[in-house]
Amino acid sequence: MISRHPPVGDFADDFDHTDPAWVNDPYPIWADLRQRCPVAHSERYGGAWLPVTHDLVSEVAYDHEHFTSRSVVVSERRPGPEDLPAPIGLAPPISSDPPYHGLVRRMLLPAFTPKPTAALEPFTRDLCRELLKATDGRGAFDASLEYAQHIPVRVIVKYLGFPQEDADLFRGFIRLVLEEVDLPQEEREERFAEVDEYMDAQIEDHRARPRDDLTSFLLEAEIGGQKLPVEHIRGTMTLLMIAGIDTTWSAIGASLWHLAQHPGDRSRLASEPALMDTALEEFLRAYAPVTMARLVAKDFDFHGHPFKEGDWLLLPFPAANRDPAAFENPDLVQLDRARNRHAAFGLGRHRCLGSNLARMELRIALEEWLARYPDFELSDPAAVTWSAGQVRGPRRLPVTILGRSG
C-alpha cells in the first residue's frame, strides 16, 4: 500500500506507521528510537505517541487509569466518548474498559476454551491440505496469496457460522479497518456501513435458524441477566473477523518468509517435529504481527512527556519483543529459545482471548506445509510486500519449491 501521507523525515518527532520505510522494515526504526527517543511523538492523526521499550509498552498496557481502549485502531479521526459510548465500545471486549471489560471477557471464555478450538483442528488440517494440493506440480507460487491468507479467513468464517463463499468479503473488510486508516473519514464511515449491514444480515439469519457456532452463542449469551444488544453482538463478531484473521494470516506468512530464507531452520523443523511448539513461540516473538492502540484518558505526564486527553498512543508489541533489555539476542531467531515470555498476544487484561486458536492454526499450517514442501526458498526477496498499518505480515510471498514429499 502507498501511504497517502508525505514521507517521514525523523521518526522521533514525525512517525507514521503507514510510511513505506516502516512498512518495509520497522525493526531498525524501533532500535534507533530505543537509543535516542524511547517515547516518540507525531502530529499526524491529530497527535500520537509511540513507546518502543518493553518496560514502557508494558506500563501502558497495564495502566487503565490514564489510557482507554475505547478505540484501538489509529485513524484520521479521534473518536470521543460520545462517538463510542461506554461501556461497550466499538468491538467488545477489546474496546471495553474495566469493569465492563471483565464481564464481557468472562462471558466469552467458554467459546475459546481448548474444546471448541480442538473441534476446529480437523477442518483446519483438511483446509491446509486442500490448499497445498492445489499447488501440485507447480515449481513456484505465492505462499501468501495461495496459502496463508486463506487459512484464518475460512476458519473464522466457519467459527462464526457464515457462508464459506463470503471469505473474499472478509479480506476487503480487513483492508478497510486495518490498512486503509489514512482514507478520508467520510469514505471510511460509508464503507463501515457495509460491514454493519453484512453483520446484521448474519445476525438475523442466525435468529431465524440457530446453530452451533459463535454467532448463535452470542445471541444466547447474557450479562447481568440481560441478552446482549445487537451493537454488542455485531461489534464482537467484527472483532473476531479482524483480530482473528489478519493477525494469524500475518503470523503464518512471516513464519514461512523466515523459513524460506534459513535452510538450517527449515531442515531442523522439518526433521524435528518435537521442536514445533518452541519454534512457534519464537516466530510469534520475532515477527509479532500486532501493534495495538490506546487513547489517552486524561492529561498527565508520562516520563517527562505531556500526554493530552484524546491523544493516540501506538502500543507496538513487536517492538517490545525486540528489546535487548527483555530478550537476549532479540534479533536472532532461535527455534529452541527457552525463555520466551513474548508479548505477541498483548499484555495485561486485554491479552488476546483467541491465542489458543491462533496457535492451533499456525501450528497446523506449518506442519502441513513442511510435510509437503520441506525445502523451498524465496523466488525473489525484492518481490515480497508487507501490509501497512497496525498488523504486519507479508502480503506477497513468492516462493520456489526445491523439494517436496509424497
Image (cartoon, rainbow, N blue to C red):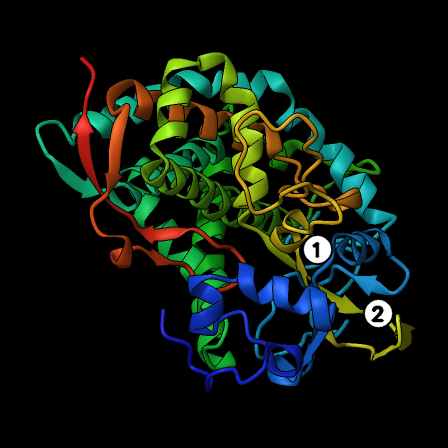
Residue 266: which quarter of the image? Answer: top left
Residue 123 image point, x, y percent: 38, 21
Q: Of circles 2 and 1, which is in front?
A: 2
Is 373 on the left or on the right of 175, as rendered? left
Image check: 93 left or right of 401?
right
Q: Position of residue 124 (x, y in %)?
A: 39, 24
Residue 335 can be seen, yes or no: yes
**Residue at coordinates 54% horizontally, 32% vertically from top-left?**
334
Q: Which quadrant of the figure contains the C terminus?
A: top left
Check residue 95 in the rendering and tell me which mark sits there, or answer none. 1
Q: Nearer the viewer, residue 7 or 28?
A: 28
Residue 73 visible in the snapshot: no
Task: Examine the rendered structure and indicate whether residue 185 appears above or below residue 50.
Answer: below
Is residue 102 positioned above or below 336 on the image?
below
* Quadrant assignment for the N terminus: bottom left
Q: Mark 2 is on which residue type?
A: Ala
Left or right of residue 39, residue 114 in this image = left
Q: What's the mark number on residue 173? A: none
User: What residue sits right under mark 2 in the picture?
Assistant: 297
Q: Residue at x 65, y 84 (%)?
A: 46
SS at circle 1: loop
Cα gap from disc 2 to disc 1, whole angstroms: 13 Å
Residue at 77% of width from left, 76% of height from top? 310
Which x, y percent locates residue 313? 71, 68
Q: Amino acid at mark 1?
A: Ser
- Classify mark 2: helix, strand or loop: loop
Q: Nearer the viewer, residue 378 or 192?
A: 378
